Image (cartoon, helix red, strand yellow):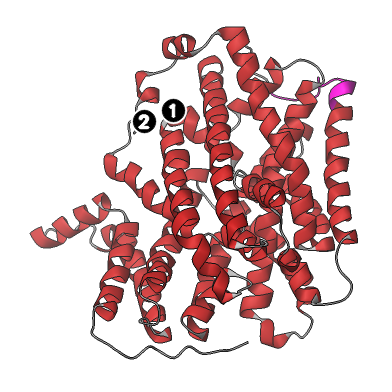
Amino acid sequence: MLPKLTTLTYLGAADWVVFFAILALTAGAAVYGNLRLKKGGNKALDYLLMGRRLTLPLFVATLVATWYGGIFGVNEITFNYGIYNFVTQGAFWYIAYLIFAFFIAGKIAKYQSVTLPDLAGNMFGPKASKVAAVFTFFYITPIAYALSLGMFLNMVFGISVLSGMIYGTLFACLYSVWGGFKSVVFSDLVQFFVMCISVLLVVLFSVHAFGGLGFLKANLPASHFSLTGGNGIMNTLIWGFIALSALIDPSFYQRCFAAQSPAVVKKGVIISTCIWFCFDVCTTTGSLYARALLPQAQPGEAYFFYAIQLLPAGLKGFFVAGILAIILSTLNSFLFIASNTLSFDLLRKRFKDIVLSNRIALFIVGALAVFMAAVFKGSFKEIWLTLGSYFSACLLAPILMGYIFPGRISDNQFVLASLTSAVGMTLWRFLPRLLAGNTDNWQAGLAGAAQTVDPFYIGLAIGLLILFSVCLQKNDQTIKRITYR
């Protein structure tokens, strides 16, 4: 069995050369994106969406790279629950990706939007845009990914997690702000190859050193091979609903708005899904080996420490760079999208220069992400579950029903459904505390139900009831949309 490691100071010169070479290549790619930034034409559109000229290879690379910044969270879930991670963070999401590719990709192009809240505004009205922007901002602010970066720098260089979050997020802000979306895309291209090769290396060396499935079954709890991982069915299924947030995910939509055509989007999402499947197999398998060989390690760190002991000199540095690439590729995208939401969707009328305001907003978002990561008490699972639940429950139903029943939901009805869902979820979440110590049978039963049924289901049900009552009404008049640009 491999010994537990506490530092990375033993890394050889070859490892550090590889690590810093990849870091320099990433920064160089971002600079290249800045050099390709057009000086004339629609400067804002070029900065925010690459002038809607994103090709299929770049679309796939940036979409895949954006999706895995919470690598330590995925490792934590696998360490604790086994293949439950593949079900909740993989299989459910593949279904959502394919629904998006075949049923939604072709619908969004006609709106010629810039952001997800901008799309909501074009579909429903200006109030819907603002409400969607608020939910999007808190969902996309990269709290978990700033924390992941802080943990990474703590493990590699021994600095505090807080210092790591500050320095790492500042670095991501600096290279993202330079060339806008192009800098994000071209840095993602480098990170895409590094991260995919890194996780594959861990699996190949693990199988070679310890054997395959038989070794894992002999050294892991039986529950690690259960689809629910010892969790309840309802707890598992909620991830299926949260996975549907991919149908309205801001990073998905940003890349779709930037793509050359709907055909690029459809093909790109299908190809990306195949790559995600392979990547998830690698990360889940590698984390299972880490659990088997380092059972006393911290759940979120075990995979990292396992891999850098397993791999030979040179490849250790490549793997460390790969983990950094996984985190940075998501962090820079989320920082950029959150800054778009703040500057373009919420404060657009206050600033004439969208590019300048976006650059300022990016640093504000970075500072907010670090602050919230420092004070947020909970695991990665709790962060994702809380933010994902509110975002999905409050926006998923209105936007999807806007596709199904175009023109039948008004601006005010969208706002009513979204906000009522949020209020209902919050009240349901605190209901057990409000009714604590109450002996009345019906109140005790209600408190028990609140502890059993996740608030997400309450919020989603409220929104659906409101919207179905609207859409099923006979109304031959199409609601007039408001153009507010």
Residue bounds of the magenta highlight = 6-15
How crowded is the residue under tag 1: few (<14 C-alpha within 10 Å), some, or many (20+)? many
Q: Is residue 114 a member of the stretch shown in magenta?
A: no
- Please give the name of the residue rendered at 67% of the width and 76% of the height, measured from the top-left corner: 344
How crowded is the residue under tag 2: few (<14 C-alpha within 10 Å), some, or many (20+)? many
- Please give the name of the residue rendered at 40% of the width and 82% of the height, measured from the top-left corner: 407
290 horizontally vs 459: left or right:
right
Quadrant location of the N terminus in the rendered image? top right
Which of marks 1 and 2 precedes in the sequence? Answer: 1
Query: Is residue 261 something one can see in this rendering?
Result: yes
- Please give the name of the residue rendered at 37% of the width and 88% of the height, measured from the top-left corner: 478
Amino acid type, label 2: Gly
317 horizontally vs 266: left or right:
right
Asked where in the image residue 480 lies, by quadrant, the reply is: bottom left
Q: Residue furthest left?
A: 441
Amino acid type, label 1: Gly
Asked where in the image residue 155 lies, by quadrant, the reply is: top right
Q: Are marks 2 and 1 in contact (CB under 8 Å)?
A: yes
Q: Residue furthest front?
A: 263
- Camera-side residue: 104 or 151? 104
Quadrant location of the C terminus in the rendered image? bottom right
- Please give the name of the residue rendered at 70% of the width and 29% of the height, measured from the top-left corner: 197
Query: Is residue 248 something one can see in this rendering?
Result: no
Q: Position of residue 202 (x, y in %)?
A: 64, 22
Residue at image mark 1: 82
Q: Position of residue 111 (x, y in %)?
A: 56, 75
Asked where in the image residue 72 lies, by quadrant, the reply is: top right
Residue at image mark 2: 229
